[in-house]
Amino acid sequence: MRTNEIFTLESRELNEGKKVAFIAGGVNRGIDKSNLKAKMKSIVECGQLMELVVVDGEDVVKDGLSLKDPVSGLPIDSSKANNYLVIIEGQHRYRAIMELREKDAKNKKKYEDAMKKWQDNGSNEKDKPEEFTPKAPKQIMAKYPLNNEILIQTLISEMNNTSVKWEKGDFARQACAAYPNNEVLKFIVKYMDIQHQRTKKGEVDDMLPNGGFKLTTLSKYLIYSSKINELVLAETCKYGEDVLENKMGDEPNKLVKRAEVILKAGLDAGFTYRFLAKGFFIDWIVEKNNLGIQYTELLERLNNVNGEVVDSIMREAQKHNFMEQLNRIG
Protein backbone atom coordinates (compact mmCIF):
# COMPACT_ATOMS: atom_id res chain seq x y z
CA MET A 1 0.00 0.00 0.00
CA ARG A 2 1.33 3.42 -0.98
CA THR A 3 1.80 6.01 1.78
CA ASN A 4 4.14 8.92 2.45
CA GLU A 5 5.58 7.15 5.48
CA ILE A 6 9.11 5.79 5.63
CA PHE A 7 9.19 1.99 5.44
CA THR A 8 11.75 -0.76 4.97
CA LEU A 9 12.28 -2.73 1.80
CA GLU A 10 12.50 -5.86 3.95
CA SER A 11 9.00 -5.31 5.38
CA ARG A 12 7.53 -4.90 1.89
CA GLU A 13 9.22 -8.08 0.75
CA LEU A 14 7.99 -9.99 3.81
CA ASN A 15 4.42 -8.70 3.78
CA GLU A 16 3.78 -8.08 0.08
CA GLY A 17 6.44 -10.11 -1.72
CA LYS A 18 7.94 -6.97 -3.27
CA LYS A 19 11.38 -7.30 -4.84
CA VAL A 20 13.67 -4.48 -5.95
CA ALA A 21 14.38 -3.28 -9.49
CA PHE A 22 16.08 -0.43 -11.32
CA ILE A 23 14.83 1.34 -14.45
CA ALA A 24 16.42 -0.01 -17.65
CA GLY A 25 17.67 1.83 -20.71
CA GLY A 26 19.78 4.64 -19.30
CA VAL A 27 16.85 6.73 -18.03
CA ASN A 28 18.54 6.74 -14.65
CA ARG A 29 22.31 6.96 -14.44
CA GLY A 30 24.45 3.86 -14.20
CA ILE A 31 26.44 2.66 -11.21
CA ASP A 32 29.78 4.44 -10.90
CA LYS A 33 32.43 2.31 -9.16
CA SER A 34 34.13 5.19 -7.37
CA ASN A 35 30.78 6.53 -6.16
CA LEU A 36 29.78 3.05 -5.01
CA LYS A 37 33.02 2.65 -3.06
CA ALA A 38 32.50 6.04 -1.40
CA LYS A 39 28.93 5.12 -0.45
CA MET A 40 30.10 1.86 1.11
CA LYS A 41 32.66 3.73 3.21
CA SER A 42 30.04 6.28 4.30
CA ILE A 43 27.51 3.61 5.26
CA VAL A 44 30.09 1.69 7.31
CA GLU A 45 30.95 4.87 9.19
CA CYS A 46 27.53 6.53 9.48
CA GLY A 47 24.84 4.05 8.46
CA GLN A 48 22.10 4.89 5.96
CA LEU A 49 21.67 8.66 6.23
CA MET A 50 18.84 9.15 3.72
CA GLU A 51 15.92 7.07 2.54
CA LEU A 52 15.77 5.61 -0.94
CA VAL A 53 12.99 6.93 -3.16
CA VAL A 54 10.93 4.22 -4.84
CA VAL A 55 7.91 3.88 -7.10
CA ASP A 56 5.71 0.92 -7.92
CA GLY A 57 6.86 -1.21 -10.83
CA GLU A 58 3.50 -1.02 -12.59
CA ASP A 59 3.72 2.78 -12.62
CA VAL A 60 7.11 2.57 -14.32
CA VAL A 61 5.64 0.38 -17.06
CA LYS A 62 2.63 2.70 -17.44
CA ASP A 63 5.06 5.53 -18.18
CA GLY A 64 6.52 3.51 -21.04
CA LEU A 65 9.68 2.39 -19.24
CA SER A 66 11.08 -1.04 -18.44
CA LEU A 67 12.75 -2.72 -15.47
CA LYS A 68 16.04 -4.50 -14.89
CA ASP A 69 17.65 -6.49 -12.10
CA PRO A 70 19.66 -4.10 -9.88
CA VAL A 71 22.73 -6.36 -9.79
CA SER A 72 22.85 -8.40 -13.00
CA GLY A 73 21.23 -5.74 -15.18
CA LEU A 74 19.10 -8.41 -16.86
CA PRO A 75 15.65 -7.29 -18.06
CA ILE A 76 12.58 -7.98 -15.94
CA ASP A 77 9.35 -9.03 -17.64
CA SER A 78 7.00 -6.02 -17.66
CA SER A 79 4.05 -8.31 -16.96
CA LYS A 80 5.59 -8.97 -13.53
CA ALA A 81 6.17 -5.29 -12.72
CA ASN A 82 3.59 -5.29 -9.93
CA ASN A 83 5.94 -7.55 -7.96
CA TYR A 84 8.61 -4.84 -7.77
CA LEU A 85 9.49 -1.62 -6.04
CA VAL A 86 11.70 0.45 -8.33
CA ILE A 87 14.45 2.67 -6.94
CA ILE A 88 14.53 6.03 -8.73
CA GLU A 89 16.84 7.82 -6.29
CA GLY A 90 19.46 6.07 -4.20
CA GLN A 91 20.70 3.33 -6.51
CA HIS A 92 24.27 3.68 -5.24
CA ARG A 93 23.13 3.49 -1.61
CA TYR A 94 21.14 0.33 -2.33
CA ARG A 95 23.99 -1.37 -4.16
CA ALA A 96 26.45 -0.30 -1.45
CA ILE A 97 24.30 -1.87 1.27
CA MET A 98 23.86 -5.07 -0.73
CA GLU A 99 27.61 -5.37 -1.32
CA LEU A 100 28.27 -4.76 2.37
CA ARG A 101 25.78 -7.50 3.23
CA GLU A 102 27.58 -9.86 0.90
CA LYS A 103 30.88 -9.04 2.60
CA ASP A 104 29.23 -9.47 6.01
CA ALA A 105 28.06 -12.95 5.07
CA LYS A 106 31.59 -13.97 4.05
CA ASN A 107 33.18 -12.42 7.14
CA LYS A 108 30.60 -14.05 9.41
CA LYS A 109 31.42 -17.44 7.89
CA LYS A 110 35.15 -16.80 8.43
CA TYR A 111 34.46 -15.83 12.05
CA GLU A 112 32.37 -18.94 12.69
CA ASP A 113 35.07 -21.15 11.17
CA ALA A 114 37.74 -19.41 13.26
CA MET A 115 35.65 -19.81 16.43
CA LYS A 116 35.17 -23.52 15.79
CA LYS A 117 38.90 -23.96 15.22
CA TRP A 118 39.63 -21.97 18.39
CA GLN A 119 37.26 -24.15 20.43
CA ASP A 120 38.74 -27.33 18.96
CA ASN A 121 42.22 -26.13 19.95
CA GLY A 122 41.37 -25.62 23.62
CA SER A 123 39.79 -22.15 23.72
CA ASN A 124 42.89 -20.27 24.81
CA GLU A 125 41.64 -16.76 25.60
CA LYS A 126 44.60 -14.97 24.07
CA ASP A 127 43.96 -16.72 20.73
CA LYS A 128 40.22 -15.98 20.63
CA PRO A 129 39.14 -14.53 17.24
CA GLU A 130 38.01 -10.92 17.14
CA GLU A 131 34.24 -10.58 17.50
CA PHE A 132 32.34 -10.32 14.22
CA THR A 133 30.50 -7.02 13.73
CA PRO A 134 28.30 -6.56 10.64
CA LYS A 135 28.93 -3.44 8.58
CA ALA A 136 25.66 -3.26 6.64
CA PRO A 137 22.38 -1.89 8.05
CA LYS A 138 19.88 -4.59 9.01
CA GLN A 139 17.13 -2.77 7.14
CA ILE A 140 17.00 -0.47 4.10
CA MET A 141 14.79 2.56 4.60
CA ALA A 142 12.69 3.86 1.70
CA LYS A 143 9.79 6.12 0.85
CA TYR A 144 7.60 7.09 -2.09
CA PRO A 145 8.06 10.52 -3.73
CA LEU A 146 5.79 13.21 -2.29
CA ASN A 147 4.61 14.20 -5.76
CA ASN A 148 3.03 11.28 -7.60
CA GLU A 149 1.37 13.34 -10.32
CA ILE A 150 4.34 13.76 -12.68
CA LEU A 151 6.15 11.42 -15.04
CA ILE A 152 8.80 9.19 -13.53
CA GLN A 153 11.38 10.47 -16.07
CA THR A 154 10.67 13.99 -14.79
CA LEU A 155 10.99 12.87 -11.17
CA ILE A 156 14.40 11.37 -11.84
CA SER A 157 15.68 14.38 -13.75
CA GLU A 158 14.29 16.91 -11.26
CA MET A 159 15.66 15.16 -8.18
CA ASN A 160 19.12 14.91 -9.70
CA ASN A 161 19.10 18.43 -11.16
CA THR A 162 18.00 20.22 -8.01
CA SER A 163 19.83 18.22 -5.33
CA VAL A 164 23.04 16.33 -6.08
CA LYS A 165 23.74 17.36 -9.64
CA TRP A 166 24.51 14.84 -12.32
CA GLU A 167 27.45 15.16 -14.64
CA LYS A 168 26.57 16.58 -18.05
CA GLY A 169 27.11 13.14 -19.56
CA ASP A 170 24.43 11.67 -17.30
CA PHE A 171 21.82 14.07 -18.68
CA ALA A 172 22.96 13.42 -22.24
CA ARG A 173 22.63 9.66 -21.77
CA GLN A 174 19.22 9.98 -20.14
CA ALA A 175 17.97 12.20 -22.96
CA CYS A 176 19.40 9.79 -25.55
CA ALA A 177 17.71 6.86 -23.82
CA ALA A 178 14.40 8.73 -23.92
CA TYR A 179 14.87 9.76 -27.58
CA PRO A 180 17.11 7.06 -29.09
CA ASN A 181 16.56 8.22 -32.68
CA ASN A 182 17.65 11.80 -32.05
CA GLU A 183 20.82 12.32 -34.09
CA VAL A 184 21.99 15.29 -32.01
CA LEU A 185 21.84 13.33 -28.75
CA LYS A 186 23.49 10.32 -30.35
CA PHE A 187 26.32 12.57 -31.56
CA ILE A 188 26.80 14.07 -28.09
CA VAL A 189 26.85 10.70 -26.32
CA LYS A 190 29.12 9.18 -28.97
CA TYR A 191 31.85 11.75 -28.44
CA MET A 192 31.42 11.93 -24.68
CA ASP A 193 32.14 8.19 -24.66
CA ILE A 194 35.41 8.54 -26.61
CA GLN A 195 37.63 8.46 -23.54
CA HIS A 196 41.25 7.73 -22.76
CA GLN A 197 41.95 4.35 -21.19
CA ARG A 198 44.83 4.17 -18.76
CA THR A 199 47.80 2.45 -20.32
CA LYS A 200 50.38 0.22 -18.71
CA LYS A 201 54.08 0.92 -18.93
CA GLY A 202 55.29 0.24 -22.45
CA GLU A 203 51.83 0.45 -24.06
CA VAL A 204 51.07 3.02 -26.75
CA ASP A 205 48.99 6.03 -25.64
CA ASP A 206 45.58 5.95 -27.37
CA MET A 207 45.60 9.78 -27.58
CA LEU A 208 41.94 9.95 -26.58
CA PRO A 209 40.66 12.74 -24.30
CA ASN A 210 40.51 12.21 -20.56
CA GLY A 211 36.81 12.05 -19.69
CA GLY A 212 35.66 12.34 -23.30
CA PHE A 213 34.61 15.46 -25.20
CA LYS A 214 33.07 18.17 -23.00
CA LEU A 215 29.49 19.26 -23.67
CA THR A 216 30.61 22.86 -24.28
CA THR A 217 33.00 21.71 -27.00
CA LEU A 218 30.44 19.42 -28.65
CA SER A 219 27.92 22.26 -28.66
CA LYS A 220 30.42 24.38 -30.60
CA TYR A 221 30.99 21.61 -33.14
CA LEU A 222 27.22 21.43 -33.63
CA ILE A 223 26.02 25.04 -33.56
CA TYR A 224 29.19 27.17 -33.31
CA SER A 225 28.21 28.25 -29.78
CA SER A 226 27.99 26.77 -26.29
CA LYS A 227 24.22 27.16 -25.98
CA ILE A 228 23.59 23.40 -25.71
CA ASN A 229 24.35 23.14 -22.01
CA GLU A 230 23.44 21.00 -19.01
CA LEU A 231 20.15 22.83 -18.47
CA VAL A 232 19.09 22.25 -22.08
CA LEU A 233 19.68 18.52 -21.71
CA ALA A 234 17.86 18.40 -18.37
CA GLU A 235 14.87 20.22 -19.86
CA THR A 236 14.96 17.95 -22.91
CA CYS A 237 14.57 15.01 -20.52
CA LYS A 238 11.64 16.74 -18.82
CA TYR A 239 9.81 18.47 -21.67
CA GLY A 240 10.82 16.76 -24.89
CA GLU A 241 12.96 17.12 -28.00
CA ASP A 242 11.54 20.55 -28.85
CA VAL A 243 13.79 22.08 -26.19
CA LEU A 244 16.87 20.83 -28.01
CA GLU A 245 15.48 21.62 -31.45
CA ASN A 246 15.01 25.26 -30.42
CA LYS A 247 18.79 25.45 -30.06
CA MET A 248 19.55 23.47 -33.22
CA GLY A 249 17.29 25.25 -35.71
CA ASP A 250 15.26 23.75 -38.55
CA GLU A 251 17.79 21.21 -39.84
CA PRO A 252 19.55 19.60 -36.87
CA ASN A 253 20.66 16.52 -38.79
CA LYS A 254 22.56 18.70 -41.28
CA LEU A 255 24.41 20.31 -38.39
CA VAL A 256 25.32 16.87 -37.04
CA LYS A 257 26.70 15.90 -40.46
CA ARG A 258 28.67 19.16 -40.62
CA ALA A 259 30.16 18.47 -37.19
CA GLU A 260 31.14 14.95 -38.26
CA VAL A 261 32.75 16.31 -41.44
CA ILE A 262 34.77 18.84 -39.43
CA LEU A 263 35.95 16.21 -36.95
CA LYS A 264 36.85 13.73 -39.68
CA ALA A 265 38.81 16.38 -41.57
CA GLY A 266 40.75 17.18 -38.42
CA LEU A 267 41.53 13.51 -37.83
CA ASP A 268 42.51 12.95 -41.47
CA ALA A 269 44.91 15.87 -41.24
CA GLY A 270 46.63 14.20 -38.29
CA PHE A 271 45.07 15.91 -35.30
CA THR A 272 44.24 13.51 -32.47
CA TYR A 273 40.90 13.12 -30.73
CA ARG A 274 42.59 14.48 -27.63
CA PHE A 275 43.53 17.69 -29.41
CA LEU A 276 40.14 18.05 -31.14
CA ALA A 277 38.45 17.66 -27.75
CA LYS A 278 40.36 20.63 -26.33
CA GLY A 279 38.21 22.96 -28.42
CA PHE A 280 41.00 24.97 -30.08
CA PHE A 281 40.24 23.50 -33.52
CA ILE A 282 36.52 24.28 -33.48
CA ASP A 283 37.14 27.67 -31.86
CA TRP A 284 39.43 28.48 -34.79
CA ILE A 285 36.72 27.47 -37.26
CA VAL A 286 34.09 29.53 -35.40
CA GLU A 287 36.34 32.60 -35.31
CA LYS A 288 37.04 32.27 -39.01
CA ASN A 289 33.34 31.80 -39.72
CA ASN A 290 32.66 35.07 -37.88
CA LEU A 291 35.08 36.70 -40.34
CA GLY A 292 33.12 35.29 -43.28
CA ILE A 293 35.35 32.30 -44.06
CA GLN A 294 33.32 29.11 -44.50
CA TYR A 295 34.36 25.87 -42.82
CA THR A 296 34.59 24.13 -46.21
CA GLU A 297 37.38 26.50 -47.27
CA LEU A 298 39.25 25.86 -44.02
CA LEU A 299 38.95 22.11 -44.41
CA GLU A 300 40.31 22.33 -47.96
CA ARG A 301 43.40 24.04 -46.56
CA LEU A 302 43.95 21.03 -44.31
CA ASN A 303 44.64 18.91 -47.38
CA ASN A 304 47.87 20.81 -47.95
CA VAL A 305 49.22 20.88 -44.40
CA ASN A 306 52.03 18.46 -43.56
CA GLY A 307 52.35 16.25 -40.51
CA GLU A 308 55.17 18.23 -38.95
CA VAL A 309 53.04 21.37 -38.87
CA VAL A 310 50.12 19.46 -37.36
CA ASP A 311 52.34 17.94 -34.67
CA SER A 312 53.80 21.35 -33.91
CA ILE A 313 50.34 22.92 -33.60
CA MET A 314 49.25 20.21 -31.18
CA ARG A 315 52.34 20.79 -29.04
CA GLU A 316 52.26 24.58 -29.05
CA ALA A 317 48.57 25.57 -29.09
CA GLN A 318 47.30 27.11 -25.84
CA LYS A 319 44.39 29.35 -24.89
CA HIS A 320 46.40 32.50 -25.52
CA ASN A 321 47.83 31.52 -28.91
CA PHE A 322 45.64 28.87 -30.54
CA MET A 323 44.50 31.22 -33.35
CA GLU A 324 48.07 32.06 -34.23
CA GLN A 325 49.04 28.40 -34.20
CA LEU A 326 46.10 27.16 -36.26
CA ASN A 327 46.49 29.98 -38.76
CA ARG A 328 49.67 28.19 -39.81
CA ILE A 329 47.36 25.84 -41.70
CA GLY A 330 46.95 28.61 -44.25
Image (cartoon, rainbow, N blue to C red):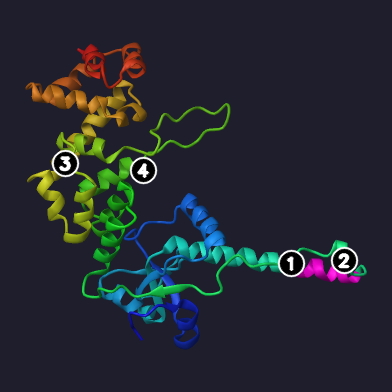
Q: Quadrant of residue 161?
A: bottom left
Q: In the image, what residue type sits under mark 4?
A: Asp
Residue at figure coordinates x 21%, y 52% from the top left: 182
x and y percent of residue 189 in the render? 30, 46
Rounded to the nearest angstrom, the CA distance separating label 2 from label 4 is 57 Å
Residue 260 to residue 251: above or below: above
Q: Is residue 44 left or right of residue 214?
A: right
Front tag of 2 and 3: 2
Mark positioned earlier in the residue sequence (1 or 4): 1
Mark positioned earlier in the residue sequence (1 or 3): 1
Front tag of 3 and 4: 3
Q: Is residue 41 visible?
A: yes
Rounded to the nearest angstrom, the CA distance separating label 1 from label 3 is 58 Å
Q: Badge 4, how many Cα within 10 Å: few under 14, some, many 20+?
A: few
Q: Secondary structure at mark 3?
A: loop
Q: Secondary structure at mark 2?
A: helix
Q: Which residue is mark 3?
A: 227
Mark positioned earlier in the residue sequence (2 or 1): 2
Residue at figure coordinates x 32%, y 78% from the top left: 58
Q: In the image, what residue type sits under mark 3?
A: Lys
Is 113 included in the stretch rendered in magenta?
yes
Q: What mark, if any, has residue 193 been given in the picture?
A: 4
Front tag of 2 and 4: 2
Mark positioned earlier in the residue sequence (3 or 4): 4
Q: Which residues are magenta?
A: 112-120
x and y percent of residue 53 in the render? 37, 70
Residue 327 to residue 117: above or below: above
Q: Which residue is mark 2?
A: 125
Residue 297 to residue 228: above or below: above
